[in-house]
């Protein structure tokens, strides 16, 4: 995913990787328009409560959080990028 987002490749938006927001470090962040992209591996199936809590902090700071499974990103990267682009 980073290869697709870095260097303003998606609609000229500047994404940061492993960026701190509040108490958490998010996978990818575009500060304008306050968009966070999180990629979830298999471990996330067992920690839904933690993930929800982790999402509330950025949302309270007026960020939109998009979550995608690693499988979805690998199998349908173009659709994931389109969804991110729609939020930009």
Image (spheres, grey):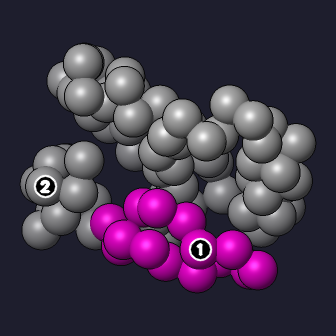
Residue sitting at x 42%, y 61%: 28
Would you say residue 21 sits in the magenta stretch?
yes
Expressed as whole percent of the image width and height from the top left, the position of residue 15 reads: 32, 66
Establish if 19 lies above or below 10. Answer: below
Q: Is residue 80 left or right of residue 3?
A: right
The answer for how far apart the CA atoms under marks 2 and 1 are is 19 Å
SS at badge 2: helix
Residue 17 visible in image: yes
The span shown in magenta is 15-28
Would you say residue 67 sits in the magenta stretch?
no
Residue identifier under label 2 = 3
Residue identifier under label 1 = 25
Q: Nearer the viewer, residue 78 or 31?
A: 78
Expressed as whole percent of the image width and height from the top left, the position of residue 87 reads: 46, 38
Establish if 35 lies above or below 84. Answer: below
Q: Quarter of the image containing the C terminus?
A: top left
Expressed as whole percent of the image width and height from the top left, the position of residue 77 reads: 22, 27
């Amino acid at each position: 995913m980073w290869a697709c987002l870095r260097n303003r490749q998606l609609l000229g938006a500047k994404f940061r990787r492993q960026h701190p927001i509040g108490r958490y470090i998010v996978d990818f962040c575009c500060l304008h328009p306050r968009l966070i992209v999180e990629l979830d591996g298999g471990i996330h199936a067992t920690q839904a409560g933690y993930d929800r809590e982790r999402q509330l902090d950025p949302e309270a700071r007026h960020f939109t959080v998009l979550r995608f499974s690693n499988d979805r990103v690998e199998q349908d990267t173009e659709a994931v990028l389109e969804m991110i682009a729609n939020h930009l």
